[in-house]
Amino acid sequence: MSQDGLEEERAALPEYRIEIGTEPLDRPARNSVGGWPYFDDGQEWPRCFCGERMALFFQLDLPDDIEFFGGQHLSVFHCAHHTDASDPITADGRLVPRFWEAPQPPFPGSFWRVLLQRDPGIPEAEPEPAVRALPLTLRPAKETYFKVGGTASWVQDPEYYRCACGSELAFVCQVPENWEFGVRPGAPVQPYSIRDDAYLLFLGNEVYLLACPKRCDPAAVFPANQH
């Protein structure tokens, strides 16, 4: 395919801007910053290597026309106490088995978890306690940077990874650099954040969520970081 043809194909991929509302949520919503997480049967709230439950940063239902992952539920978790850039631990050109639990130097385990679940049903009884719950809305748009679908807008060279199962990871979602997630009063202060009342993902790096298109595991999503 010619370069022009490739650009046209990429431009045709459905893409949605993620917009955050201003009115706090007082009840469960499937598209939210913070809020009440939704889990598949048997899926538990992720925990950091330190044993603490990870904070739910945001969750949303992917539109049906998103390639590979349409209709699935995306949830992004990160420890409030431990933060760093993500580290792609590889072996033989692939991410290691269960890479989402692998050590993340200087830490002995993972401090993040990203889930793509097929059919989460009833929300948790209690909301995320630290991140302030706000509604999310998805709107069709092009060339946006907090988005799902389309193609990654890399700020450095593109990154490509293979899942431990052998599949090439595919782009799902992008979170802009230094994007702030408001926290509730009294929540733990996140190390290295911009402000005491905000959390950042991965030290505020630009985040690209790349997932296994074969869906070998709900947690087979790698957060590539650039700045």
Image (cartoon, rainbow, N blue to C red):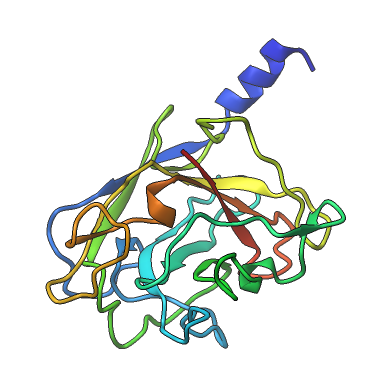
Q: Is residue 111 left or right of residue 98?
A: left
Query: Which percent across, then down, holds residue 109?
Result: 59, 75
Point 14% across, 64% down: residue = 24
Point 18% across, 62% down: residue = 196
Q: Is residue 20 left or right of residue 2?
A: left
Outermost right residue: 92
Number of numbered discs present? Answer: 0
- Which image quadrant: the N terminus? top right
Query: Which percent across, then down, holds residue 133?
Result: 22, 67
Query: Which percent across, then down, holds residue 129?
Result: 25, 79
Q: Is residue 214 above or below residue 148?
A: below
Query: Which percent across, then down, holds residue 200?
Result: 33, 56
Point 50% across, 47% down: residue = 173
Of 224 and 12, which appears nearest the observer?
224
Of 152 and 109, which appears nearest the observer?
109
Residue 95: quadrant of the picture: bottom right
Point 68% across, 67% down: residue = 99
Of 140 and 91, which appears nearest the observer?
91
Q: Is residue 55 left or right of residue 61?
A: left
Q: Is residue 199 above or below residue 12?
A: below
Residue 65: quadrant of the picture: top right
